[in-house]
Amino acid sequence: MDEEKRIGVFICHCGTNIAGVIDVKELAEYAKTLPNVAHAQDYTYMCSTPGQAMIRDSIKEHNLNGTVVAACSPRLHEPTFRKATEEGGVNSFLFSMANIREQDTWVHMEEPEKAMEKAKDVVRMEVARASMLEPLTPKTVPVEKAALVIGAGIAGIQASLELADAGIKTYLVEKEPSIGGNMSRLDKTFPTLDCSQCILTPKMVDVERNPNIELMTYSEVEDVSGYIGNFDVTIRQKSRYVYEDKCNGCGKCQEVCPVSRPNEFDLGLMPRKAAYVPFPQAVPLKFTIDMDSCIKCDLCKGEEACGDLEAIDFDKPDELTTVKVGSIIVATGFDMYDVERKEEWGYKVFDNVVTGIEMERLISASGPTGGNIIRPSDGQKPKSVGFVLCAGSRDQDEEDGAKPYCSRVCCMYSLKHAHQLIEKIPGCVPYLFYMDIRSFGKAYEEFYYRIQNEGGKFIRGRVARITEDPITKNLTVTAEDTLLGTPVEMEVDLVVLANAVVPAESTQKLKTLLTLSNSPDGWLLEAHPKLNPMSTTTDGVFLAGMCQGPRDIPDVVAHAAAAAAAASIPIHKGSVTLEPIYAIVDQEHCGGCATCIGVCPYGATELNEVDSKLVASVNEAKCKGCGTCGSACPSGAIKMQHFTNEQIMSEIEAFAQGW
Amino acid sequence: MAEEFEPNILGILCNWCTYAGADLAGTSRTQYPPNVRVIRIMCTGRLDPAFVLKALSVGADGVLVSGCHVGDCHYLAGNFKSRRRVALLRKLIEEYGYDRERLRMTFISASEGAIWAEVVQDMVNTIKKLGPNPLKQVGAAGAAGQVGVVADDEF
């Protein structure tokens, strides 16, 4: 080393989080005895303004050229202390953090002496590392002034409109033929009883009309490469077999189409043709031909139908489009729990057992019954309806794929269904079998009271079994009333299973493409559960709506707007600073064996001829800093900056001084 | 009375999954044995076999490598490469006379703090059964770091 190392060690008390378990003064005294340490001190809250000032001032006062802060996790405050180090006039990469809170005093509270020993070891290891650190310069790259939103349910729609209104070109990709998502299936929304379509359709139309939004329906993201500010996204636009620019939405192709099959939008409760739009308010109002069921009779192309418009082409191929965007919002929503797996409730076995979302279609004026609530078995209006709440939620039965979490919407939509039944069918009594009624939102509890007053009956207990009378098709619901402590058997005309929401199947592929993680419950993992629920650990990728966890419409809209705001920050800033943590090749030592080419997941390493010798090099922009090439290089020619062999080896040596 | 053997275990954890999981164990105040000292790397793909050999050569009683679940790697496939390296290394250290159980690789996500605590407990139990690094017994003579089974000149 050219220059004498002078490291300052700063020990944080973190109130009593650290100082309540170990003796921070002793730790500071210990740090002073370590090689290269020129200064050590402790302070109540190192991350506070005076704490940071202490680092800054000590650097100057003691002429330090490296810092170690022993405090919380670097995943929390590394940026804070890097900045403080930089402000003291020392390169921010000459700072290292000793995690003595999350990985020490919080997990060894009951063994303070051993926690102290560990704290000393950790500080010693970080001081050794800090002694080997090298100054690095972050790189600034320009940001593409466009964004991608994946999924066009209410979350994706909201996020796109916010971005577009902020002047950002937004590509909105939706896998279905129309935007709208699950919200477009709903009849009314709780607790205000707003008509779902009435509040959603204007937003859908806004999306179509907004000049900043490029809508790509019936499309899926095929590939993503690049990094924050510069993502290259390949999108497959599946063929509708209809030219969108020629189709005027007249629907004549649908009229003549002889094929009939269940409409997915109505969960199979209503038929559709092979030439179809999923629902009347679809955006864009362009027809799609379902080639899996089309019999190619050509009637839709005839003069009676599409005729001179010539919008239909059975040979129209899929199209691949590549777009460049600065940030990406994932808004892929949810699926419904497959409640058929709960055999005791007889879904799909008994005609008159339906799910909550099927109930929505049965109530909806645009649904299969035109808004008449009838039993599937005989078309009669039900006079008594049983609701099974927590159908697959708050349930630890892993074998049935049930979920331990609360789905957060089922209590409220079941209350709403109860209200609608009372309103639409005079004399109809809804019986809600519940575990707890969770009416936590604004005006939700009041809505719950309202349904009680309107005549909704509440039985506290999980339904154990549903049986069917084979002649009347009436259902007998068996449960335990846990408030009275008695078993209940009740005959009802119809049963609605308020089934859980589960992570969308289609999100899985995206998760890999965008290198996202999920929490144990399967929802996408946020950067921080409280302080950053709309960001992910992949810079430039954000989450909106249910893909991150169950939430109702107002929370989805708020989350989507937050994601849009977060996604617009790098775009409006115009540039992003990238961590200089990338690999570099010492071409002198490189043998040109190409091992690094094979292990790099990003194609960032390449082999070139330099002075008539094949040598590797690393493309800094493509390198994400995993360091795999560095550990694979047989000649030790690749240096993984900030995680060099020397730095890690020095930590191991310092570790060994602990015994 | 002989003091109970407390293993010195080196943890080499990836930043995105297991290190975050270990942080979560802290946030949740999940208590586990204080025998592991952690080195943070961005990805377990960074695991140079020399790190493991070095650690054992300087007297570590065990090395615990832990990264993201297979398929969840923040860098797509670093954990696959590390898994292969660890599998080979486990055979290699046997050649040097170490029990292969002294080296372990696990896959623990950012949300699995409780599993991290379990893994540490289990690793500590395993190493306690195996006893101290044999080099430590031999090497009362040599100070830590002096008894090398691999040449570490290049570092």
Image (cartoon, rainbow, N blue to C red):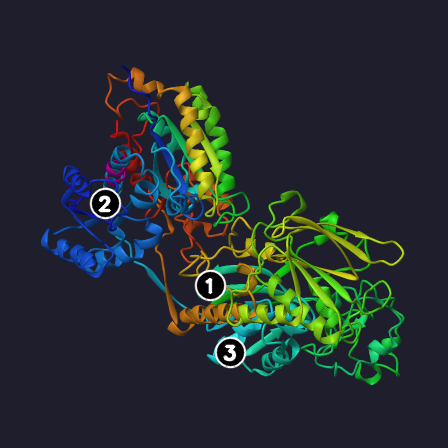
Q: Residue A59: x, y in percent?
A: 15, 54
The answer to which of B149 and A266 lies nearer the viewer is A266
Reading the image, the residue beneath label 2 is A19
Reading the image, the residue beneath label 1 is A534
Of helix, strand and loop, which one carries label 2?
Answer: loop
Q: Is residue A269 magenta?
A: no
Give, as a single range, the part of the protein colored magenta: A118-123
Going by the numbered disc 1, the residue's amino acid type is: Met
Q: Quadrant of the C terminus of chain A?
A: top left
The answer to whether one can see residue A655 in this image is yes
Q: Earlier in the sequence, mark 3 or mark 2?
A: 2
Reading the image, the residue beneath label 3 is A164
Going by the numbered disc 3, the residue's amino acid type is: Ala
Task: Measure the C-alpha gap from mark 1 to mark 2.
Answer: 33 Å
At 51% from the left edge and 65% from the top edge, which residue is drawn?
A328
Q: Earlier in the sequence, mark 1 or mark 3?
A: 3
Residue A274 in the figure: left or right of residue B135 = right
